[in-house]
Amino acid sequence: MKIIFHLIDLSLVNAWLLYRRHCSQNQIHTKDVLSLLTFRIDVAKSLLQSSPPPPPVQRGRPSLQNISDQNNTTIDVRAAPVPVPPTSTRIDKFDHWPVSTTKGRCRNGRCLGYSRISCTKCKARLCLNEKKNCFKDYHH
């Protein structure tokens, strides 16, 4: 940590020296040039104002009112559907590998199940288990 603070301090001093050089080149009076301390304070203020304040942290057990408010919200967030790849890409039989992903509806037209397997090339979720092999049907 000491090294990081030293590097920040070094860069601030270098920036102040460049500021002083710039002021002398533009013939600004010496009394109008900021001191190193004032320069540091101005940089700190501008950095603190550039980011929004963090949200307040609520401590303790949640009240019953907050829990009931959370249960009453009916926000239905839906994921955008994955576009169907072109038929030439889907049946080219090259580089289609099943990978594990989040649970979602199977994209095979005749299947109504859910799957955690997706194709690396098509980006479509497809059933692949002992009972159903939608992965093979989809790519043939």
Image (cartoon, helix red, strand yellow):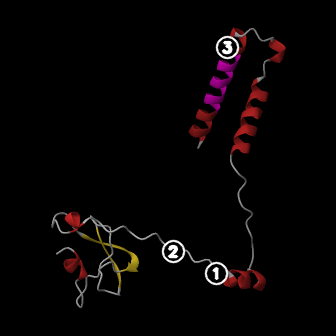
Q: Amino acid at mark 3?
A: Arg
Q: Residue at x 67, y 80 (%)?
A: 73
Q: Residue at x 78, y 83 (%)?
A: 65
Label 1, on which residue?
Answer: 74
Q: Are marks 2 and 3 in contact (CB under 8 Å)?
A: no
The location of residue 37, given as percent across then percent down, is 77, 28
Horizontal side, residue 24 vs residue 84: left or right = right
Horizontal side, residue 15 vs residue 135: left or right = right
Q: Nearer the viewer, residue 57 or 135?
A: 135
- Quote the CA–CA distance across marks 3 and 1: 60 Å
Residue 15 on the magenta span = yes
- Which SS does the magenta portion mostly show? helix
Residue 21 numbered mark, or none:
3
Judge the density around disc 1: few (<14), some (14-19), many (≥20) Cα neighbours within 10 Å: few
Tell me the quarter of the image containing the C terminus.
bottom left
- Quote the CA–CA distance across marks 2 and 1: 12 Å
Q: Amino acid at mark 2?
A: Arg
Residue 56 vertical position relative to residue 13 in the rendered view, above or below: below
Judge the density around disc 3: few (<14), some (14-19), many (≥20) Cα neighbours within 10 Å: few
Q: Amino acid at mark 1?
A: Thr
SS at badge 1: loop
The location of residue 131, given as percent across then percent down, is 24, 91
Horizontal side, residue 4 vs residue 51: left or right = left
The location of residue 97, given as percent across then percent down, is 23, 69
Residue 89 on the magenta span = no
Identify the magenta region: 9-22
Label 2, on which residue?
Answer: 78
Of callouts 2 and 3, the N-terminal one: 3
Residue 5 numbered mark, or none:
none
Q: Nearer the viewer, residue 89 or 72?
A: 89
Tell me the quarter of the image containing the N terminus.
top right
